[in-house]
Image (tube, rainbow, N blue to C red):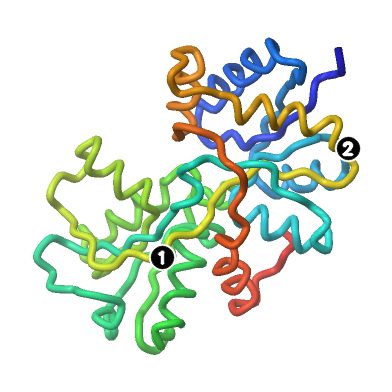
């Protein structure tokens, strides 16, 4: 039996421990056992991947972009969640605001999430610029909660929504998962309406470097893709991680973030 692969993940919420204990239990019954290490932020995790102290990193899209930049493109993505292939940014405003489309933000205040959140800060600015709107046209209120976790906690997005409710901003940019959670959990029932939704883009993926040989990564990947929603023991973990099935990576879905990072002069370092 080969030694366990070591997977890194960021501890953005307490149930991350339950998720990865469940993943470890699942892989223990395959020919590709694994263990996991939790990090406080993505910078530490990417450093560990590059240093070779972990074999696989469960990266956000920004962590992927920065890993590509720091390795001259020598990293590779193994897989992502089905939900990672259809991620979106949503612009929301108070119900009845009359806002419609990005152009309606001209002369308004837009609340953004953490500066390292692709969905709630980096890509919203990118989409505004694509629409011909700069900081002279739209006032940006930046809320940097939980920097280092790339918006995973959703805290900064909720703070952005509260800024709108407090009339410190006219609208907020949030990720599709936060928008769906508001309706599902009735956190702020009826308070907001979506007035613009971005094209889809890719979010998280499992990232590896060339030092992990295919004979090590391939059995692990095969076992990962074999997780079955119809199997109750698998479903419990899949539900906690927010997916129905693992899928091959869709790398084209990162093009908008690569462009945004370059256009905004963001470093590939931390």
Q: Residue visible at 62% across and 57% down?
A: 251
Q: Quadrant of residue 184?
A: top left
Residue 201 versus residue 186 in the image, above or below: below
* Marks 1 and 2, how far apart at CA: 35 Å
Asked if 74 appears above or below 198 in the picture, the reply is above
Report the side of 149 relative to 242 (left or right). right
Q: Secondary structure at mark 2?
A: loop
The image quadrant where one finds the C terminus is bottom right
- Residue at 43%, 85% in the rendered image: 134
Residue, x 71% and y 40% (percent of image)? 57
Residue 257 image point, x, y percent: 57, 66
Query: Is residue 200 shown left or right of residue 213?
Result: left
Q: As drawn, is 87 to the left or to the right of 139?
A: right
Q: Nearer the viewer, residue 26 or 39?
A: 26
The picture quadrant where one finds residue 48 is: top right
Q: Residue at the spot x=61%, y=44% of the render?
A: 248
Does residue 217 appear to the left or right of 113 in the view shown?
right
Residue 10 x, y percent position in the rendering? 62, 37
- Depth check, front residue: 131 or 243: 243
Q: Is residue 148 visible?
A: no
| Residue holding disc 1 | 199
Q: In the rendered view, would you say 138 is above or below 81?
A: below
Tell which residue pokes out farthest to the left in this image. 96
Residue 60, given in percent of the width and then of the height, sits at: 59, 49
Image x and y of residue 176, in percent: 36, 52
Residue 120 visible in this rendered orientation of the protein = yes
- Residue identified by numbered label 2: 213
């Amino acid at each position: 039996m080969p030694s366990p692969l070591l997977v890194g993940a960021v501890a953005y919420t307490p149930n991350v421990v339950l998720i990865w204990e469940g993943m470890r239990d699942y892989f223990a019954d395959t020919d590709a056992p694994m263990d996991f290490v939790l990090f406080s932020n993505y910078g530490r995790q990417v450093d560990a991947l590059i240093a070779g102290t972990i074999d696989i990193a469960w990266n956000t899209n920004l962590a992927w972009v920065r890993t590509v930049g720091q390795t001259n493109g020598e990293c590779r993505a193994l897989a992502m969640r089905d939900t990672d292939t259809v991620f979106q940014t949503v612009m929301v405003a108070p119900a009845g605001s009359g806002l419609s489309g990005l152009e309606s933000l001209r002369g308004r205040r837009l609340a953004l999430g953490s500066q390292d959140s692709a969905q709630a800060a980096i890509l919203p600015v990118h989409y505004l610029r694509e629409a011909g709107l700069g900081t002279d046209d739209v006032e940006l209120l930046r809320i940097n909660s939980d920097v280092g976790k790339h918006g995973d906690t959703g805290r900064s997005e909720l703070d952005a929504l509260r800024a709108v409710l407090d009339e410190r901003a006219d609208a907020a940019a949030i990720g599709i998962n936060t928008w769906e959670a508001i309706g599902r959990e009735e956190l702020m029932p009826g308070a907001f309406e979506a007035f613009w939704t971005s094209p889809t883009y890719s979010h998280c993926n499992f990232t590896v470097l060339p030092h992990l040989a295919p004979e090590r990564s391939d059995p692990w990947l095969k076992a990962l893709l074999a997780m079955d929603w119809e199997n109750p023991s698998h479903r419990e973990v899949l539900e906690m991680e927010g997916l129905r099935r693992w899928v091959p990576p869709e790398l084209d879905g990162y093009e908008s973030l690569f462009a945004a990072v370059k256009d905004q002069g963001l470093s590939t370092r931390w």
